[in-house]
Image (cartoon, rainbow, N blue to C red):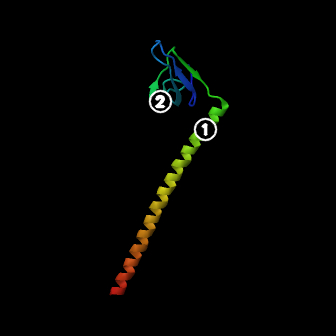
Amino acid sequence: MSGSVGDRITLHANSTGSSDRVGTIVGVLGSDGPPYRVRFDNGDESILTPGPDATIEAPSVGERLEQVADRATETARETAEKARETAEDATGRAARAVADTAARIAERFER
């Protein structure tokens, strides 16, 4: 059974009192298949090798586009945060340089 990131996996219940567990493959840890890192719809995440009671389905084109858009949005957020941190660091260094220069100038005037 082979799956890719973004595929939906269903672990079918093997008793009448249990319900199916459904999730999305978020990582393929094997070289060409299982084990998979799965994020279930309830938010839990697990590493598993699916057995015969599991089915894997590729998402529709619309679902795949939504997944790509979600990943792009997250990447953009992370990039923006890193840029903000870099700008704050640069601003802080510039402010310290100005303060140091002002202090040296003040020392010269005191002499």
Total marks shown come to 2
Q: Residue 5 sits in which quadrant?
A: top right
6 above or below 52? Answer: below
Residue 39 is situated, as x and y percent measured from the top left of the image, at 49, 30
Q: Is residue 104 left or right of residue 49?
A: left
Residue 18 is situated, as x and y percent measured from the top left of the image, at 46, 16
Give the number of the mark in front: 2 or 1: 2
Q: Quadrant of the C terminus?
A: bottom left
Mark 1 burial class by Cα count in 10 Å: few <14, some 14-19, many 20+? few
Residue extending furthest left?
111
The residue wearing badge 1 is 68
The residue wearing badge 2 is 42
At label 1, the amino acid type is: Val
Q: Residue 9 sits in which quadrant?
A: top right
Mark 2 burial class by Cα count in 10 Å: few <14, some 14-19, many 20+? few
Q: Secondary structure at mark 1?
A: helix
Q: Quadrant of the N terminus?
A: top right
Residue extending furthest right?
61
Q: Secondary structure at mark 2?
A: loop
28 above or below 20? Answer: below
Residue at 47 percent of width and 30 percent of height: 42
- Tag 2–tag 1 contact (CB < 8 Å): no
The answer to which of marks 2 and 1 sits earlier in the sequence is 2
Residue extending furthest top?
15
At label 2, the amino acid type is: Asn
Q: Is residue 97 left or right of residue 2?
A: left
Residue at 53 percent of width and 48 percent of height: 77
Q: Is residue 22 left or right of residue 58?
A: left
Residue at 51 percent of width and 55 percent of height: 83
Q: CA distance from mark 2 to mark 1?
A: 21 Å
